[in-house]
Amino acid sequence: MQPIHIPREWHDDDLLTFDQFCDLVQIPSRTVRDWRRRGIGPTWARFEGCGRLYITAAEVRRFVSAVAPGRSA
């Protein structure tokens, strides 16, 4: 597997969509949806009135370092 590269210029409060997260960490969206259903995995946010799920860059960094130490760049 290739390392997960999280750009250093991303601010902790930058937002990624659900699909962007799945692409970044190279995990099928079906798996991430199952994590959400089971209450495991990263913490997601949804804006009121918007159906999309978002994750902050800080949460992506936390998640990657927790599950795959040494894979982030």
Image (cartoon, rainbow, N blue to C red):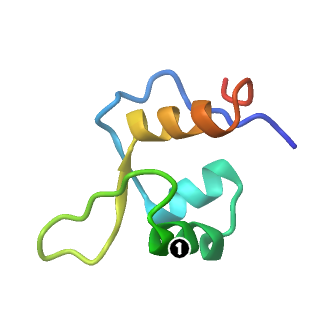
Position of 9 relative to 15 (above/below) = above
Q: For the point 59% across and 34% down, which residue is it?
A: 66
The quadrant of the rendering that contains the N terminus is top right
Q: Quadrant of residue 65?
A: top right
Q: For the point 52% across and 57% down, which residue is it?
A: 20
Query: As rendered, which of 58 and 68 lies closer to the eye?
Result: 68
Outermost left residue: 48
Q: Quadrant of residue 14?
A: top left
Horizontal and vertical percent position of residue 30:
63, 77
Q: Secondary structure at mark 1?
A: helix
The quadrant of the rendering that contains the C terminus is top right
Q: For the point 47% across and 75% down, which residue is it?
A: 37
Outermost right residue: 1
Horizontal and vertical percent position of residue 64:
60, 37
Horizontal and vertical percent position of residue 43:
38, 52
Few, some or many residues within 10 Å of mark 1 (<14, 14–19, 20+): some
Query: As rendered, which of 27 and 36 lies closer to the eye?
Result: 36
Q: Quadrant of residue 70?
A: top right
Q: Which residue is mark 1?
A: 33
Horizontal and vertical percent position of residue 40:
50, 59
Position of 11 relative to 57 (above/below) = above
Q: Is residue 72 left or right of residue 32?
A: right
Three-letter residue code for mark 1: Arg
